[in-house]
Amino acid sequence: MSFAFLIEHVEDRARAGVFSTPHGAVQTPAFMAVGTLATVKALDPEDLRQLGAQMILANAYHLHLRPGDELVRELGGLHRFMGWDGPILTDSGGFQVFSLEGLRKVSEDGVTFRSHIDGSSRFFSPESVMAIERNLGADVVMQFDHVIPGQSEEAPAREASERSLRWLRRCLDEFGRLERPRPQALFPIVQGGIHAHLRREAASAIVSMNDWVGYGIGGLSVGEPKPDMYAMLDVVDDALPTDRPRYLMGVGFPEDLVEGVRRGVDLFDCVAPTRMGRNGTAFTSQGRLNIKRAELRTDPRPLDDACDCSTCRRFSRAYVRHLFAADEMLGPRLLSVHNVHFLVALMRDARAALRDGGFDAWSREWLARHATQTAHAR
């Protein structure tokens, strides 16, 4: 099986479809759990299958540092290495250009990083990143791009976006040159910060460069206000072809997923569900829940009465709170299971609403209820 995208239901700009990959089909819209180091933190691949995850993400930068992309290739690629037989996407390290600002130096040739593990110098170029992602063997690989803070002024945003376009051409050339044992798809990334004309320029240049399998939307949820992020999604929706999947990178709070689907996004990823789970916060249909709160010590209810994940089916709030109070590792694991399930199920509900022709009403009601619950929580 190679790559294809079939849109089955459309309502305004929202759509439900099927993204076919060599390791299986992904029903979209979908949330991808993040397994940065070839593991979704605290979760076994069997957990992911049981909670309904379809596709996961790993990070080329971190896996290059440890254990090494060539080792992963020798051991059969990411799928075999981590025991996950579904689709995988690898990020290129572009986000680390943003997040590791104090440990890197950007030039036109690429980026020199100082390893946070041992202090060694590592040079990432568009060409080397394509080789790393080839070695890892994910189904979808992302271009190497220059990510900057979301609220950046026009001049640095233009510089980073235009550099990302030049790097994309180099990625495409190297992607075509490299031999690979199995099919992979290269996604470009639309940059441009919060400047609509830069986003349009980037999208136009990308579309004219190649017949892409799908498109990434990057440089959002990196410090800009949410209304600005949503405005940029409106711009990109108008600028990109409608017959290919769109992947909004690094976005994963529930309200952002619903707002993204409303604006034509098909795929999402974020570390938020497992990171928040490890810190004691659960997504629920009644808003966020801090499991460490003292009043939950005797609460017999599940985390969320509306949830059917394995955590909610089996355990009480009181028990999960006890695990955190006792510093037991099962606590973060149970909350991580619940949070990833919550986002996977949210996208499943969105698909169902699209199939039934009631997505607009469903999404407006969901967002209004969420806003009210968030206000009450404050």
Image: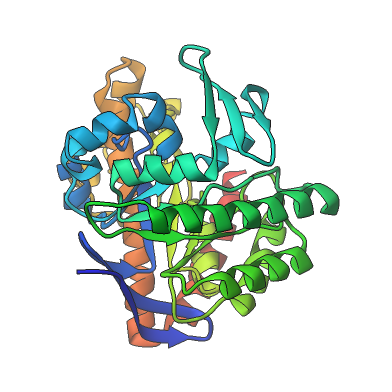
Residue 212: x %, y % from top left: 46, 70
Residue 124: x %, y % from top left: 53, 35
Q: Nearer the viewer, residue 328 or 268?
A: 268
| Render colour scheme | rainbow
Q: Residue at x 30, y 56 (%)?
A: 139
Q: Residue at x 25, y 34 (%)?
A: 72
The quarter of the picture where the C terminus appears is top right
Residue 211: x %, y % from top left: 47, 74
Q: Quadrant of residue 17?
A: bottom left
The answer to whether residue 345 is above or below residue 181 is below
Q: Nearer the viewer, residue 347 or 137?
A: 137
Residue 302: x %, y % from top left: 28, 43
Residue 300 seen in render: yes
The quarter of the picture where the N terminus appears is bottom left
Q: Nearer the viewer, residue 309 or 33?
A: 33
Q: Is residue 235 left or right of residue 265?
A: right
The answer to whether residue 101 is above or below residue 12 is above
Residue 276 seen in render: no
Q: Residue at x 20, y 45 (%)?
A: 79
Q: Quadrant of residue 223?
A: top right
Q: Is residue 62 left or right of residue 303?
A: right
Q: Is residue 92 left or right of residue 320?
A: right
Q: Nearer the viewer, residue 61 or 312?
A: 61
The answer to whether residue 228 is above or below residue 135 is below
Q: Residue furthest top?
A: 118
Please give the count of numbered marks on the rendered protein: 0
